[in-house]
Image (spheres, grey):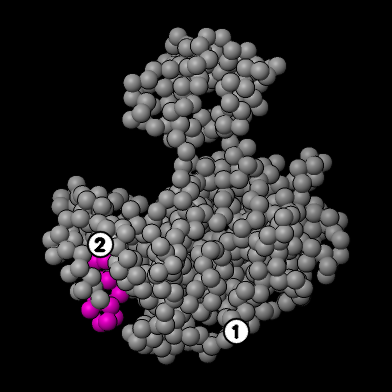
């Protein structure tokens, strides 16, 4: 297939241009409070726009979003353009006395709290290169203060991945503490490993890191601009926060914690600084409607619990907080405004939860609820409730999924054909690909891009090499992107158009880095192998392997009926079964062979390894493991 034949980005169609113009008239663009808050306390920024890795490759460009200073064109939703302009402001900002933030150096913010001896770092961005650049910027203005502690507010990679840019393992071994909420390590590593390949590939669409930046391309993701593409690392925490009200002091910095599990992340916490009258809301209250089910994929979050924790934060901290800041976006200043901000965010998640439940109990399906859901005028008027990152549409579907699952109750949807088989039948029913495309082109001219994308998708899945279908689908997705207020929707649409025209971009940012994999417990590592077993190919295999650890309990693996199970210790089941092969070794050697860095043949040559039984069975077992595909197709079968 010759992809160069597909056309480049087009201008906005008249219907999209009119819809975007209506946004300009409808929303309160004269309200400049966010602009004032976002630029308040600006200290300075880096001299060099490009942040590079050791090989000289650019992993972040501070200047690439300069085009956002221009007036919003017809090819972007003015509300999203406004949000992206605010997120693109980069540099070091003073939040309050002794608290600074580096913003615009990555998808997230890095917060720096000054103590008596040095500086305490909260959420060191996604990669080591951007975190190091942010710390260097801070030190260029505030002096060469040592890092006296690190804190991860929650278990998403953009809040811990850059840790090696601010501290080393030697620093931590030497006494620099690393704080995290209870359960952080389990969720941080499992999310990025078990389904990490699929999440990473879909994140390429969600954040649009590989898209050209510009008025017809990527303008931001609503939560920030995009993801950096440097080295993602992880240094495990040395101290867990286990309860709300727990108080810790580091370098004279006193912190009071509020655990908020099950909100924006499975393990997350807010932090109050009583001596600074400052409240860090992690990612629980940012200047947008957040995701209840992120488009890259994740566990469904609980808006009911989210709203309750926001209410709790107001009760615990708002009356003694002159500023609230988060790990994305800009702060909110003034106690009355902090209370208003947090209570409005609370009402946002509670309203979506309660009204979705009301409508599903009236028999409406997820799609119907998404179409009917409208926020109250008071919520709609607040800029920070807009769906720049999460959306009302996909969040209501997430709530429906949380309570009722994927099935809408209609038996016609219980056993539908899979996409390719259904597409072939649809296209045949509709008169063939030529007739479908003829009608779709007419719908395109009428501005019904949503329908074009839906119907041409059938042609693409029936005939993936159909050049005309690829071109028309790319054009329709592009127009839908131009009209999206939601940054991630825009990126998904434009990435779909980009890959239809130019081919797959793969996975620009890989969160399952060596550090993350190394942090897996042995139990998690064995589970990670189990999901890689090619079940049909191993149906008839029965293999039992016992790993006798010289520095731990024995682990017995058994492959049976295409299922790879493991038992630690000498219990029942596989642990007492007759073994095909036993391997005595230390844990580092076990990890090496399970991760594939050492072959079974080379394993026997190690001085610390003894193998009894049939070593060919170990080779056979590992041979049933398949490799995930970080380049799988999304907009084509």
Quarter occupied by the N terminus = bottom left
Q: Position of residue 560 (x, y in %)?
A: 37, 21
Highlighted magenta segment, given as a residue range? 442-457
Q: Nearer the viewer, residue 100 or 214?
A: 214
Q: Which residue is mark 1?
A: 69
Residue at horizontal 60 percent and vertical 84 percent from the top: 69
Specify whether residue 454 is painted magenta. Answer: yes
Taking 564 as reference, is 22 above or below it? below
The reply, left or right, for residue 401 in relation to residue 505 is left
Label 2 packing within 10 angstroms: few (<14), some (14-19), many (20+): many
Q: Position of residue 417 (x, y in %)?
A: 21, 49
Q: Nearer the viewer, residue 47 or 158?
A: 47
Q: Which residue is mark 2?
A: 459
Residue at horizontal 46 percent and vertical 45 percent from the top: 629
What element does badge 1 sit on? Answer: helix
Marks 1, 2: nearer the viewer = 2
Q: Position of residue 334 (x, y in %)?
A: 64, 76
Q: Are marks 1 and 2 in contact (CB under 8 Å)?
A: no
Precedes in sequence: disc 1 or disc 2: 1
Q: How many marks?
A: 2
Q: Main secondary structure of the magenta part?
A: helix
Q: Nearer the viewer, residue 337 or 17?
A: 17
The reply, left or right, for residue 472 in relation to residue 485 is left
């Amino acid at each position: 297939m010759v992809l160069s034949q597909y056309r480049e980005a087009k201008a906005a169609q008249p219907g999209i241009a009119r819809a975007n113009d209506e946004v300009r008239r409808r929303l309160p663009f004269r309200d400049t409070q966010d602009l004032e808050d976002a630029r308040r306390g600006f200290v300075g920024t880096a001299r060099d726009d490009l942040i590079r890795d050791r090989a000289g490759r650019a992993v972040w460009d501070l200047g690439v979003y300069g085009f956002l200073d221009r007036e919003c064109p017809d090819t972007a939703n003015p509300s999203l353009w406004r949000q992206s302009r605010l997120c693109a402001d980069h540099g070091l900002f003073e939040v309050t006395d002794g608290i600074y933030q580096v913003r615009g150096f990555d998808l997230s913010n890095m917060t720096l709290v000054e103590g008596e001896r040095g500086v305490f770092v909260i959420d060191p961005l996604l990669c080591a290169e951007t975190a190091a650049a942010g710390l260097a910027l801070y030190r260029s203005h505030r002096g060469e203060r040592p890092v006296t502690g690190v804190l991860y507010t929650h278990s998403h990679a953009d809040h811990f991945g850059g840790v090696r840019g601010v501290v080393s393992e030697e620093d931590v071994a030497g006494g620099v503490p690393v704080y995290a909420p209870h359960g952080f390590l389990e969720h941080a590593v499992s999310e990025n490993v078990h389904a990490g390949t699929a999440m990473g590939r879909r994140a390429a669409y969600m954040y649009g890191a590989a898209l050209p930046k510009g008025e017809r391309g990527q303008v931001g993701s609503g939560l920030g601009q995009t993801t950096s593409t440097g080295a993602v690392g992880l240094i495990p925490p040395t101290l867990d926060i286990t309860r709300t009200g727990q108080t810790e002091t580091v370098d004279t910095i006193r912190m009071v914690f509020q655990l908020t599990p099950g909100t924006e992340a499975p393990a997350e916490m807010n932090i109050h600084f009583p001596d600074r009258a400052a409240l860090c809301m992690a990612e629980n209250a940012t200047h947008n409607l957040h995701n209840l089910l992120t488009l890259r994929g994740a566990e469904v979050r609980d808006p009911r619990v989210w709203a309750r924790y926001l209410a709790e934060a107001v009760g615990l901290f708002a009356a003694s907080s002159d500023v609230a800041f988060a790990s994305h976006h800009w702060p909110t200043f003034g106690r009355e405004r902090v209370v208003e901000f947090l209570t409005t965010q609370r009402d946002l998640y509670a309203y979506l939860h309660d009204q979705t439940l009301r409508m599903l109990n009236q028999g409406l399906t997820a799609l119907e609820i998404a179409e009917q859901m409208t926020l109250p005028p008071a919520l709609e008027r607040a800029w920070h409730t807009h769906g720049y990152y999460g959306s009302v549409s996909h969040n209501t579907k997430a709530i429906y999924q949380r309570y009722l699952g994927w099935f809408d109750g209609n038996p016609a949807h219980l056993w539908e054909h899979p996409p390719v088989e259904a597409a072939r039948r649809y296209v045949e029913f509709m008169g063939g690909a030529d007739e479908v495309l003829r009608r779709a082109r007419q719908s395109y001219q009428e501005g019904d891009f949503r329908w074009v994308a839906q119907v041409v998708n059938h042609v693409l899945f029936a005939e993936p090499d159909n050049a005309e279908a690829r071109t028309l689908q790319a054009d329709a997705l592009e127009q839908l992107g131009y009209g999206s207020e939601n940054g991630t929707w825009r990126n998904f649409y434009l990435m779909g158009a980009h890959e239809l025209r130019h081919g797959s971009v793969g996975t620009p940012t890989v969160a399952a880095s060596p550090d993350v994999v190394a942090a897996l417990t042995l139990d998690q590592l064995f589970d990670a192998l189990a999901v890689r077993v090619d079940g049909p190919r191993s149906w008839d295999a029965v293999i039992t392997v016992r790993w006798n650890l010289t520095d731990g309990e024995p682990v017995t693996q058994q492959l049976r009926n295409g299922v790879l199970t493991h038992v630690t210790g000498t219990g029942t089941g596989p642990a007492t079964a007759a073994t095909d092969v036993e391997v005595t070794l230390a844990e580092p050697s076990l990890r090496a062979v399970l991760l594939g860095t050492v072959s079974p043949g080379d394993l026997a040559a190690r001085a610390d390894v003894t193998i009894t039984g049939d070593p060919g069975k170990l080779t056979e077992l590992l041979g049933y493991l398949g490799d995930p595909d970080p380049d799988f197709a999304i907009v084509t079968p």
